[in-house]
Amino acid sequence: MLFDDELHEAVETLKQQPTIGAVYQAVDGEVVRRLLLPRASQHVYYAVDEAKGVVTVHTVWGARRGRGPKL
């Protein structure tokens, strides 16, 4: 399926380049980034804890909605 494949590719990319996404906003001192899944027209909203080497995906949100999610 298109969405599953593209999300899997995004996760693999984030493992190698966690700061590739554009900075979206700061939430409670945490920088939230977003990465576009262009074929599925979705954004992956995530944060990176570089000290722990952890990427946390907060949500996947439709890029066509015209507004971002409440984080």
Image (cartoon, rainbow, N blue to C red):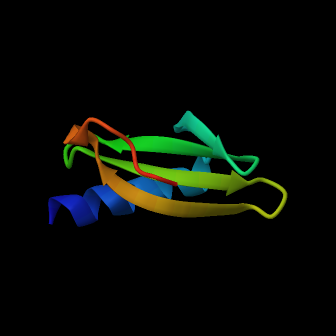
Residue 15 locus on image (x, y percent): 58, 57
Identify the residue at image location x=84%, y=57%. 51
Residue 34 locus on image (x, y percent): 48, 43
In the image as oriented, which residue stretches furthest toward the right? Answer: 51
Q: In this view, does 65 lie to the left or right of 24?
A: left
| Relative height, residue 26 to residue 3 (above, below) | above
Identify the residue at image location x=67%, y=53%. 48
In the image as oriented, which residue stretches furthest toward the front? Answer: 70
| Relative height, residue 45 to residue 19 (above, below) | below
Taking the image as drawn, is residue 68 in sight? yes
Q: Nearer the viewer, residue 45 or 7?
A: 45
Residue 23 locus on image (x, y percent): 58, 34
Q: Is residue 59 left or right of residue 20?
A: left
**Picture mark count:** 0
Identify the residue at image location x=59%, y=38%. 25
> Which quadrant does the N terminus fall into?
bottom left
Taking the image as drawn, is residue 19 in sight? no
Identify the residue at image location x=17%, y=59%. 2
Residue 60 locus on image (x, y percent): 37, 57
